[in-house]
Amino acid sequence: MKLMNDGKAGPAVAKSRRRFLQMAGVAAASLPLGMRHLAAANIEPGADAVLLVIDVQNCFLPGGTLPVSDGDQVIPIINELGRKFDNVVFTQDWHTPGHASFASSHQEKQPFETIEMPYGTQVLWPDHCVQGSTDAQLADGLDIPHAQLIIRKGYHSEVDSYSTFVEADGSTKTGLTGYLQERGLSKVYVCGLATDFCVSWSAQDAAAAGLSVSVVEDACRGIDLDGSVAAAWKAMTDAGVARIRSSDIV
Ligand code: VGL
Ligand code: ZN
């Protein structure tokens, strides 16, 4: 096989290799990680599929209060993905002022330290995504006018909610499971910010709710505290979540 100078297969080569792999019945997920880009899965989102766009808000973009490195780079990829789905749901981190997940709400605590809460260990964050603020608004660059729902989370002042299904107490529901069920949306494609927190927790909860779940890795970016991105991918994969790329969706 001819390789281009950077060692990656050129588009035509990649395409024929993809066809070969399809004919050979090789699923992208069965390939070693470094080779997955060679085999696209050709997923066509149908009426039962929903693109779940997690927390693409000013606070998580460069210049925001809790910026995720390169967080803005997911926006064009997500816009492109959005055009391939009839059903799109946005989520919005939506904290009360003085929220319990903010370091500033606890004496002598700094952002990124942890604290024990009644529901378990909580990472403490800079003040972010306060209800009604510009910081909490969805990113201006998002261009998916046919999106149908914005689900807000983290609005109970004493409980955080990385997951867009169940709050961190493990029991309080946001209502999203019921919404998806009533609309017959059983295939969830997750993207957005941050891979290791809200994306990961949401994907795992969606899998626990019996939904088919894929995370679009190049449409996500992580915060990465002490290897938390790698740990999140392991937890998601162990929960049965598929790891795909935007090029897998046609
Ligand atoms: C998130 C930390 C705190 C996220 C939200 O969207 O991943 N992370 N609040
Ligand atoms: Zn938050």
Image (cartoon, rainbow, N blue to C red):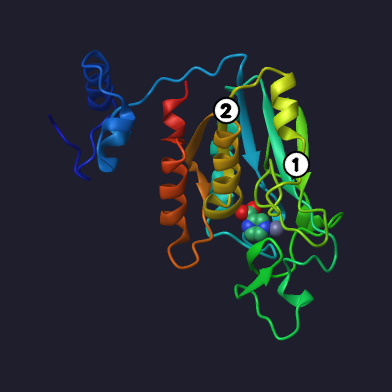
Query: Is residue 60 in sight in this rendering?
Result: no
Q: Which residue is mark 1?
A: 173
Image: 218 above or below 110? above
Q: Amino acid at mark 2?
A: Leu
Where, quadrant-wise, is the N terminus in this rendering?
top left
Furthest toward the left, the residue is 1
Comparing 1 with 186, the one in front is 186
Say which residue appears at 70% left-offset and 67% top-offset: 117
Say which residue appears at 47% left-offset and 36% top-offset: 241
Other-residue count near label 1 (Cα within 10 Å), few / some / many at <14 / 14–19 / ≥20: some
Comparing 188 with 120, the one in front is 120
Query: Is residue 250 in sight in this rendering?
Result: yes
Q: Secondary structure at mark 1?
A: loop
Nearest to N terminus: mark 1 or mark 2: 1
Task: Say if mark 1 contacts mark 2, CB within 8 Å.
Answer: no
Comparing 98 with 117, the one in front is 117
Say which residue appears at 23% left-offset and 19% top-offset: 16
Q: Amino acid at mark 1?
A: Lys
Residue 211 marker:
2
Task: Locate residue 236 relative to residue 192 in the image: left or right.
Answer: left
In the rendering, at what x and y percent does residue 104 appear?
Answer: 76, 76
Comparing 12 with 166, the one in front is 166
